[in-house]
Image: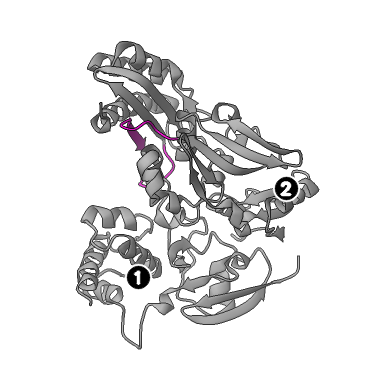
Amino acid sequence: MKPPKFDYHAPASIDEAVALLQRYGGDAKVLAGGQSLMPMLNFRLTRPAALVDVNRIAALAYIREDDSTIAFGAMTRQRTIEFSPVVAARLPLLREATRWVGHLPIRSRGTIGGSIAHADPSAEYPAVLTALDGAVVAQGPRGRRTVKAGDLFETYLTTTLAADEVVVEVRLPAMPAGAGYAFEEFARRHGDFALVGIAAMIVRAGGRCTAARLAAAGAGPVPLRLRAAEEILERDGLGEAAIEAAAARAAELVQPDSDVHASADYRRHLTRVLTGRAIKRALTVATA
Amino acid sequence: MSDLPVRVTVNGRPREGRCPPRKLLVDFLREDLGLTGTHVGCEHGICGACTILVNGEAARSCLMLAVQSDGAELTTIEGLMTDGALHPLQEAFREHHGLQCGFCTPGMLMTALDLLRVKPAPSEADIREGLSAVLCRCTGYHGIVKAVQAAATKLSRRP
């Protein structure tokens, strides 16, 4: 089908965008890369009074780094991230996850801020944000605030941000040098949303695990940090038995629903298998 | 809301029109500019038939509003030939049975064009992954993969 009628605004500044969102009082939608919102409009699953298109706000597209953090303007395209030398060097987990996001023509338009604000629990970027304990910066009528990943996702397609707030920046801590990482995912067709995806980062010192970061996508209403599974690795090390125990714990932690794509049991099974695979593959790229 | 101007460069030529903000870019290309080579398939970004280049990068023209393309440089399937000669990708598709009904072909070609720019010497796996962005219901993909391999070889030999 074709999109329903809406007012269209393409502001040149963030302040203007926020003012528009405030004016429409929750009846406007922010149009970022459009790779989720446009299908929803075409199918008339959403009928906003207005679109606030933030594609003309040049100040929202950048990758900046300092000693500890990589900051992405919300409108940084997934394609830019895929080919960014900064991301390859300091956030290789994000780079690997990016290749699972749709297809290259989708990534040409799709943005990091849009993917996170859309809050699809089966999407890759929210899982990476959760695994690495990142944060978003949101701007609203009362200024800017930082929201940590753990406080951002409320339920399916819903964040804790207010209707007149817009994500302006995504911040991820740079991964420690030599950290192992892997993004494992299962979908029935390449480029589809994950039935389950697992983001993993492992920092090792010999056989010991000094830090483990695990998060699941597609296994519940929000991306889920698998802290109790991480603790097993940090306590018991990186032997076969510890990895098996962590993977089994991960499957207990998730709260998947059954839907037309997969049953809850199958998603739990995938969580266990993919967590084990992700940890093992992460170890093959970890140094020290 | 009233119509808005859309000024674009399509296949090297400046074109313009006016349309309602809800008009999709693919419909603007077909209905307003008469460029019917780009096909409308699923209208939700899955099938890839409407893929064009936007500022040199492959993108779904069903997932963009025409007004969003104002100021952009677009390449459609009509821009692939030069001086009446088929592009090596087009020749290779003809040579290797890369199409049957032809519905997906414009999207396949524009996706392959972008793929070969990003990866000039792709492996078969790279090609299959890249082309998974476009659905074909006739060929079984083998001919398409062969065609892209052949075009990659030919393009790499170009001076």
Seen from the viewer's position, the closer of residues A135 and A243 is A135
Residue closest to the eye, B151 or A70: A70
State the SS at label 2.
helix
Task: Classify mark 1: helix, strand or loop.
Answer: loop
Q: Is residue A134 above or below residue A245?
A: below
Badge 2 is on which residue? A18
Q: Which residues are magenta?
A: A174-194
Can residue A41 be spotted in the picture? yes
Quarter of the image where one finds residue B2: bottom right
Q: Position of residue B44 (x, y in %)?
A: 51, 55
Nearer the viewer's eye, disc 2 or disc 1? 2
Q: Quadrant of residue A239?
A: top left
Q: Position of residue A114 (x, y in %)?
A: 56, 46
**Image mark for residue B101:** 1
Residue drawn 68% across and 41% down?
A: A139
Q: Is residue A1 magenta?
A: no
Q: Looking at the magenta stretch, what is its main secondary structure?
A: loop
Above or below, comparing residue B118 to residue A119 in the picture: below
Note whether A258 is above or below A112 in the view shown.
above
Side of A19 relative to B155 (left or right)? right
